[in-house]
Amino acid sequence: MVFEAYAQRLLNPFRGAMHSVRYDSAEAVTVDGVHWDIYVTNTAVVPTSGRGRHGQISEIRYGKWSQAAGLKRGRLYPSDDFRRMESMGAVLYEHLTHAHQQLPFAFKDQFELWLLDRDARPLALLESALEKNALKFDLATDWRAGIAACERFQSQAMAALQPSATPAPNAGAYLTAYINARAGTPAAAQWFQRAADGRGTGLGGIRLPAEFEDRTLPAAAFPPLFLATTGHDALHRQLIEDFQAWQAPWLLLLPLNAATRRVLEQQARRQALLVEQQHRLYPACIDDAFIPAARVEALLRRSQQPPEQEQDDALAPFYIELNQDNGK
């Protein structure tokens, strides 16, 4: 039996990582390292413009699992399709009960779609893919700070960038407009395949001039925290760096050098609830007291107020589903 275990970034904006364990057409996924959803796809079902066999099942939710709560089975169907898919889900579930101990998994999404600036340099990461045949060329080329950022992100730079704005300027919306204005006209994006050493081999793109195809860029050309911080005036650079500080609980999911991780750990302390949700998927920790302190702070905050229920625009429909009823 061949099992795969890997992680993929949730992007535009970056809001975490999906960790997956796969066996054939069965897949178990988690976004917090605790709660897993197990799905099985029926690969025998092929769309045929309505001429397919009636009663075939295209996908089932085998169940939800966590080590503490055990397995909660999904809906049962009386069909041969379901029995075949259920058998595959059972194999994956058995493997998952051991494989989850190996978290976090390595990122597999080596194909990256970058919004390009006016000089055709990587400006902001828009999308990623696991395989070359999964690249999409009909995507929007606008970068988004996200709904959560428009609601909660603040930066002292805004007082100088929009001093007379009434009402108070929205830092998330302003940053979204600014980054997209830094792109070329019309905005272009390019897929790159990233190598182990960070180099990127250019592939196709969206509104990409032909002369930029098949180029190779060094690792330094790709912003490690997904937004370029060079080429801006001081105030806009501060705005971008403040945004990355606000993103710290999610950015700590990435493979980072020690110096960057140390800074992000300090910045993430202000968002203890998010750290508590994500920390099981952090690949390293510089300050041994960082996570215990964040968990204690999160516990205190939860005891003082009802838990917030948030859905960010970065979440795909299946990711939103994963976050439903996680506490039950």
Image (spheres, rainbow, N blue to C red):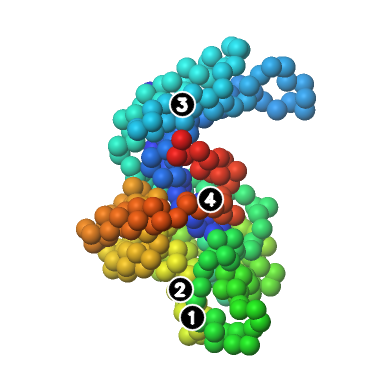
Residue 41 position within the rendered picture, expressed as x and y whole percent measured from the top left: 56, 27
What's the amino acid at mark 4? Gln
Identify the disc placed on residue 156. 1
Q: Which residue is mark 3?
A: 72
Label 3 vs label 2: CA separation? 41 Å
Q: Tell me which numbered mark, 3 or 1, is placed earlier along the sequence.
A: 3
What's the amino acid at mark 2? Asp
Q: Tell me which numbered mark, 1 or 4, is placed earlier along the sequence.
A: 1
What's the amino acid at mark 3? Lys
Q: Label 2 near label 1: C-beta < 8 Å? A: yes
Q: Quadrant of residue 94?
A: top left
Which residue is found at the position 29% from the left and 66% from the top? 262
**Nearer mark to the viewer, of 3 and 4:** 4
Vertical placement of 5 versus 54: above or below? Answer: below
Q: Tell me which numbered mark, 1 or 2, is placed earlier along the sequence.
A: 1
Foreground pick, 19 / 161: 161
Which residue is found at the position 53% from the left and 40% from the top? 324
**Nearer mark to the viewer, of 1 and 2:** 1
Foreground pick, 86 / 266: 266
**Nearer mark to the viewer, of 2 and 4:** 4
Q: Tell me which numbered mark, 3 or 2, is placed earlier along the sequence.
A: 3
Looking at the rendered structure, the secondary structure element under dot 1 is: loop
Q: Quadrant of residue 266?
A: bottom left
Identify the disc placed on residue 242. 2
Vertical placement of 284 versus 22: above or below? Answer: below
What's the amino acid at mark 1? Gln
Identify the disc placed on residue 309. 4
